[in-house]
């Protein structure tokens, strides 16, 4: 089994990304061409025989007791609900009913301590509309409503994977402060007029009125620790490289250029001051994982293989 991965997707093209204006908190929509390119990316990279496999994305429930877990299922899985009610209506204790139903529906087995850890978050998305619209157009599909009002029509029916989405401030774009909405040449000219010597490097200097490299590092380290604890450590420590619900622990992040480059650096244990020697185009996709299936050896995956072999093995089973 492949080591769990994090797929990072930069939002599609906007008018400001085209002309190089720093876009942090400003909610700039995708261009028409940006939307078309994201749809094409989804068709090329998302699917059961592609790079991003929806059914392999992480699916974990947070600190749910047996009773809470069964209540959750009563409202989420019709097949399980009918069986469970059939057993309990004849006087079966809840625990025994669960055991009987679990044998018939093995995907709903509980772990030994009778609780799931983590909550159902397979994707982290920035609060900015351009990132949310990008997620919509990738056409991955989720089990329930998205945590925002749709920003336009969908790209299709979606590949339902039974997961939900978390919007988190931890992956919003770098706060550019005084440099919001202006280009790098304009920033250099502004700094010269202010008598600030030397070249400006966001990875070293940050943004006045906005975030420093340490500010960004702190929130990204928090998110990375969360991903590893909830999804990747359990998958890497299991005997078959999967979580109890037969997911690989893969996670999807849809966000922005500077913050995803910073995320990749922190993932690999590099400081932002080192400066990334890599780029992520608007609408681009990157992959992060681990070397030797070891949580202590995070790595940037330069080329991720498609998963046709998984489908072939399932077909032969």
Image (spheres, rainbow, N blue to C red):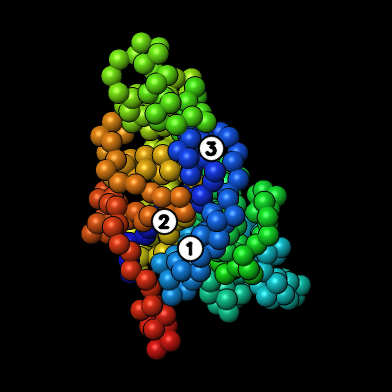
Q: Which residue is mark 1?
A: 41
Mark closer to the observer (3, 1):
1
> Would you identify the image quadrant in which residue 289 lies?
bottom left
Q: Is residue 295 visible?
A: yes
The Cα atoms of the two marked residues, 3 and 2, are separated by: 20 Å
Q: Which residue is mark 3?
A: 169
**Which residue is found at the position 45% from the left and 31% from the top?**
183
Q: Is residue 42 visible?
A: no
Q: Which residue is mark 2?
A: 285
> Would you identify the image quadrant in which residue 200 lies?
top left
Task: Pinpoint residue 56: horizontal percent, then vertical percent.
Answer: 46, 66
Find numbered disc 3 in the image and state the secondary structure of the residue it sits on: helix
Picture quarter with the C terminus: bottom left
- Note whether 75 is above or below 85 in the view shown: above
> Would you identify the image quadrant in which residue 155 lies?
bottom right
**Which residue is found at the position 25% from the left and 50% from the top?**
297
Which numbered marker is on residue 27?
Answer: none
- Note whether 110 is above or below 184 in the view shown: below
- Note whether 299 is above or below 159 in the view shown: above
Structural crowding at the residue carrying mark 1, measured as other residues with C-alpha within 10 Å and reported as few (<14), some (14–19) or many (≥20) = some
Find numbered disc 2 in the image and state the secondary structure of the residue it sits on: strand
Find numbered disc 1 in the image and state the secondary structure of the residue it sits on: helix
């Amino acid at each position: 089994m492949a080591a769990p991965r994090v797929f990072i997707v930069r939002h599609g093209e906007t008018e400001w990304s085209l002309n190089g204006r720093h876009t942090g908190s400003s909610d700039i929509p995708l261009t028409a061409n940006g939307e078309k390119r994201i749809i094409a990316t989804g068709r090329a990279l998302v699917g059961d025989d592609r790079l991003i496999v929806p059914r392999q994305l992480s699916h974990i429930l947070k600190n749910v007791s047996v009773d809470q877990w069964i209540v959750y299922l009563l409202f989420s899985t019709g097949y399980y609900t009918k069986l469970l009610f059939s057993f309990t209506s004849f006087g079966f204790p809840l625990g025994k009913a669960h055991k009987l139903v679990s044998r018939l529906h093995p995907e709903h087995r509980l772990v030994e301590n009778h609780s799931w850890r983590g909550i159902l978050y397979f994707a982290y998305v920035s609060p900015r509309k351009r990132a949310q619209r990008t997620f919509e157009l990738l056409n991955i599909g989720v089990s329930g409503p998205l945590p925002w009002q749709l920003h336009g029509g969908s790209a299709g029916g979606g590949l339902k994977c039974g997961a939900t989405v978390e919007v988190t401030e931890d992956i919003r774009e770098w706060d550019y402060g005084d440099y919001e909405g202006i280009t790098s040449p304009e920033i250099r000219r502004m700094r010269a007029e202010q008598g600030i010597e030397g070249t400006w490097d966001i990875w070293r200097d940050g943004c006045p009125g906005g975030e420093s490299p340490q500010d960004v590092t702190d929130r990204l380290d928090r998110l990375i620790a969360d991903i590893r604890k909830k999804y990747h450590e359990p998958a890497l420590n299991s005997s078959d490289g999967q979580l109890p619900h037969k997911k690989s622990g893969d996670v999807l992040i849809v966000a922005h250029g500077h913050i995803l480059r910073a995320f990749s650096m922190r993932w690999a244990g590099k400081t932002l001051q080192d400066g990334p020697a890599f780029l992520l185009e608007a609408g681009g996709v990157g992959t992060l994982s681990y070397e030797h299936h070891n949580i202590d050896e995070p790595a940037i995956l330069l080329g991720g293989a498609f998963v046709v072999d998984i489908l072939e093995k399932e077909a032969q089973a």
